[in-house]
Amino acid sequence: MTTPTVADTWTARVADRIAHLVPPGQALPDRQPAYVASWIYVFGVTTLAGLAVVLVTGSVLAVGGATWWHVSSFGHFVNSAHLWSTEVFMGSMVIHLWGKFWMAAWRGNRALTWITGVLAFVASIGAAFTGYLSQTNLDSQWISTQAKDGLNSIGVGAYFNVLNPGQMLMWHIVLMPFFIGVITVMHIVLVRRHGVVPPIDAEEGVR
Amino acid sequence: MAPSSILAVVDVATGHYLHWGVIQISLTNLIVIVVMVVVFVLALLLPFPGGHDDGGDQ
């Protein structure tokens, strides 16, 4: 029986994999290619900033509970901050999407970066939708009854019920944030791994 | 929940909707979309402060 070396352990393999996720010096770079000096490259970061505020304000709302914002002025303020940070998050993500679409950002072996961005966008729509359903007011009741017909028409109503506020709240504060968090980390790692996509008329690798 | 609080919850202002043939959109959503398009165009046109070629030595 041979004694396993350190490199044979799964922890060593995982550590090595993490260490080589991005090229050396690219995890938190302090310099970027000249073409990144444009406002259109800002919206990925503003999306992340919006997401951070969404998570913080959502965590505060979780302390008070789903109906807290109806009966507390501070809860109302936090709920409004949750809404407007979501507006910044979704708006920035859409502008980020427009910019990346028109610069064909899937070029240069960046297909998986594009796909993870699409998944993040779709998941964010789901998170925003379940957020609408978690307002505990007539608005959420109206939206859920309108949505159930559309969702049932494509068959997915067999797997979840948008009229179940407890289920939708759990999706909104557990499942959707978890999925968005994981896919966002993957997206950022891929961006750092392959670098920011250059403009179409710029030569790849010229920085 | 106090009755006054319940009334506050129920008393949600109805939105303003625009109709154009088969298209119906709330004024709020239209404003948000227009603002996004304007910000997108400005992001393409406005110069980035401090933007310069960093020597290409990365």
Image (cartoon, coloured by chain):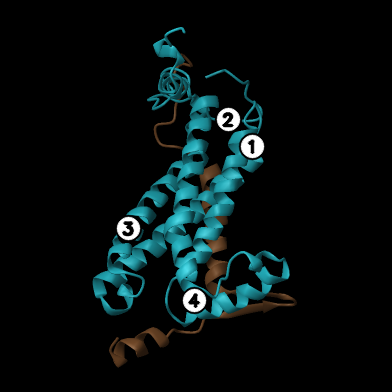
Is mark 2 in CB contact (under 8 Å) with mark 1?
A: yes
Residue A165 place in picture, x, y as percent: 47, 73
Lower sequence index among marks 3 and 1: 3
Is mark 1 in CB contact (under 8 Å) with mark 4?
A: no
Q: Residue at x 52, y 37 (%)?
A: A187
Label 4 belongs to which residue? A140
Visible residue check, residue B40: no
Residue type at mark 1 is: Met
Chain coloured brown = B
Q: Please say if A89 is above or below B56.
A: below
Q: Please say if A4 is above or below A77.
A: above
Lower sequence index among marks 2 and 3: 3
Q: What's the distance in space between the residues labelled 4 and 2, CA to CA?
A: 40 Å
Chain coloured cyan = A
- Provide the secondary structure element on which disc 1 rests: loop
Residue A65 place in picture, x, y as percent: 32, 69
Q: What's the distance in space between the residues labelled 1 and 4, CA to CA?
A: 38 Å
Label 3 belongs to which residue? A59
Label 2 belongs to which residue? A197
Lower sequence index among marks 4 and 2: 4
Q: Label 2 crowding class (10 Å Cα cut-off): few <14, some 14-19, many 20+? A: many
Labels 1, 4: one chain: yes
Labels 3, 1: one chain: yes
